[in-house]
Amino acid sequence: MSVKRLIRGCKKGELKSQEKLYQLLSPKLFAVSLKYCRSYEEAEDNLHDAFITLFNKIDQFDFKGSFEGWAKRITINTALQNYRKQQVFDIIDYSNIEETEEELSVEQTQISTDFLLGCIHELPYRYQVVFSLYVLDDYSHQEIAEILKISIGTSKSNLSRARQLLRDKITDHERSSSFRKHTP
């Protein structure tokens, strides 16, 4: 069954279409949810909430653009709304802090993707969210500021701090790996 047909079925309230659409999209949307949640269980809850929103608002999808992209935005927004309710963010004006644009280069290191994702999950939440939105999902600082209700300077500062913390973790990991290789 095509995605368009499933969407049309969902708009009519057909449970079978909802089930098939869930089965089709849930693996991808769960991966998105994991980037914005602190645990597997939290990501599952977020995915559940995102699908409730998706099915409630599916009439708003007008077949312009990617449905998967639309669903991804709902998933991200659901996670961010849950954290806004918990007042996780410290709203601090970092506009006077200089931004560095030094990039992390995973290719130059011998770290696994799992290790890197683990490091991202260990970041303080405000850094993790800004890093994920900017680096992994290509949001601009303007968009991040609007979504999180923070200043652009705070977004830039949080990204800079996240990069520095990740750089430090990777350096520490490489040093300990190198030490283990040279220890008899």
Image: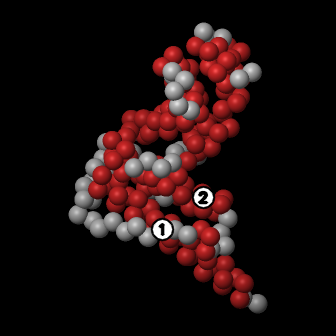
- Amino acid type for the residue under numbered disc 2: Gly
Relative to residue 121, is residue 51 depicted above or below? above
Relative height, residue 138 to residue 84 (above, below): below
Q: From this viewpoint, which residue is outermost toward the front?
A: 64
Front position among marks 2 and 1: 1
Quarter assignment of residue 31: top right
Quarter of the picture containing the N terminus is top right
**Real-space Cα distance between discs 2 and 1?**
18 Å
Q: How crowded is mark 1: few (under 14 residues within 10 Å), some or many (20 or more)?
A: few
Q: Which residue is drawn at 37% across and 68% down?
A: 100
**Residue at horizontal 62%, vertical 74%?**
109
Image coordinates of residue 137 in percent, x first then y, are 51, 48
Residue 38 visible within the image: no
Circles 2 and 1: CB atoms closer than 8 Å: no
Name the residue that disc number 2 marks: 118
Q: Which amino acid does label 1 sit on?
A: Glu
* Front residue (pair 13, 30): 13
Of 80 and 104, nearer the camera is 104
Tell me the number on the disc at residue 103.
1
Please tell me which residue is depicted at 33% across the width and 66% down the height of the picture.
99
Can you say whether 70 is above or below 130 in the image?
Answer: above
Task: Please give left or right for residue 5 compared with residue 164 in the image.
Answer: right
Residue 19, by quadrant, is: top right
For residue 51, what is the image quadrant? top right
Side of 165 relative to 148 (left or right) = right
Disc 2 packing (10 Å; few <14; some 14–19; many ≥20)? few
- Secondary structure found at label 1: loop
Q: Where is residue 86 in the image (x, y as percent from the top left)?
A: 40, 39
Where is residue 139? Give x, y as percent: 44, 47
Residue 98 in view: yes
Question: Vertically, is 32 above or below 70?
Answer: below
Across and down, in percent, residue 23 comes to 71, 28
